[in-house]
Image: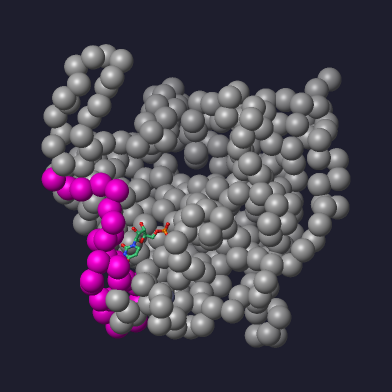
Amino acid sequence: MLNPTEHPHRRYNALTGEWILVSPHRAKRPWQGQVETAPPDTRPAYDPACYLCPGNARAGGKTNPPYTGTFVFDNDFPALLPDTPTDEPETHSLFRLEGERGICRVVCFNPRHDLTLGQMEPDQIRPVIDTWAEQTLDLGGRDFIRYVQVFENKGAAMGASNPHPHGQIWATGRLPREIDKEIATQRDYYAAHGVTLLADYLAEEQRRQARIIYANAHWAVLVPFWAIWPFETLLISTRPARSIPELDDAEREALADALHQITARYDNLFRTLFPYSMGFHQQPTDGQEHPYWHLHAHFYPPLLRSATVKKHMVGYEMLGTPQRDITPEQAAARLRELSAVHYTREQTGQ
Ligand code: H2U
Ligand code: ZN
């Protein structure tokens, strides 16, 4: 009989409708690899050369105000523009091309240059959540915007341009590809069962416990059953909320706590400022009702075995199907047993 801890198998991603490959027999001794330590974090609290620090000049001539909380500005090099023509100059069905409108912004999480989300306490993360909510309302309220994507690229390994704690928001006239997929699966599930897909999924994960890393009254963090990246996680709201703005005070406090828990554990895993791309998937802002939507956030970290050994999505994964060696259950167990006291605090005894 198939043993999922030993035999190669494939797993279905209920949120995207795609399959992944799991090869547990290749990871019999996953934790005996190298344990190297990344260079110490020597960032100053303020960096005069940083284009995100308060009071500093940005490329393109603008100057940041002496901000003390979060700070949002229009990206000086935006990938999308609000006034792009949206007609379709191509008529051939094999050469489809459409203008895309949008607005790109940068969100500084904190004035301090030497922090990351993982090093910020829940009460420092809370204003970031409020800012995401405000931005979703502001951008989503525009008539040409149908989706607001809140995200963070953290670490040079993910292409982040600057270690100052910051994220981005891209708001677009059309729905992004990942959202299209999640609409199809969540809408079908809701139509068939009358509850959200992630509500049923979370209830089952709570029952099984094997992949849950952390849970509080309003959020759970787990390694999804169908995770591709070694330490990929999914943050799910207990109530099937549809967007960040609709979260009440208690849910925002609990979200700050959950974000602290997962990002601090990530940093502690390989004792490094753990790189990842993360982002929230909320309902479209197209003025329609989306009762099937269930608010969640994905964390996609590239590290596999240490501060420098990354997983590469190459070869069979590019040409065939994404594949992983250590199982989602093993990854969850590792993250679950870690402390959420950031390793840089342990070092200084604070
Ligand atoms: P990362 O999240 O990948 O680090 O990107 C930061 C963004 O900051 C990037 O999209 C923008 C870049 O265009 N940026 C500015 O808007 N002004 C600047 O002075 C430098 C970088
Ligand atoms: Zn800075």
Write the start and end of the magenta stretch as one range: 58-83
Quadrant of image for the N terminus: top right
On the question of residue 231 being in view, the answer is yes
Farthest residue, direction bottom: 349
In the image, residue 119 sits, relative to residue 332, either above or below, namely below
Residue 74 in magenta stretch: yes
Residue at the (65%, 85%) spot, across then down: 350
Q: Position of residue 44 (x, y in %)?
A: 51, 82
Residue 104 in magenta stretch: no
Q: Position of residue 36 (x, y in %)?
A: 77, 63
**Observer-nearest of 61 and 205:** 61
Residue at the (39%, 47%) spot, across then down: 241
Residue at the (53%, 50%) spot, across then down: 299
Q: Position of residue 147 (x, y in %)?
A: 29, 43
Magenta span main SS: loop
In the image, residue 49 sits, relative to residue 158, either above or below, namely below
Q: Position of residue 237 (x, y in %)?
A: 47, 50
Residue at the (74%, 67%) spot, across then down: 37
In the image, residue 327 sits, relative to residue 93, either above or below, namely below
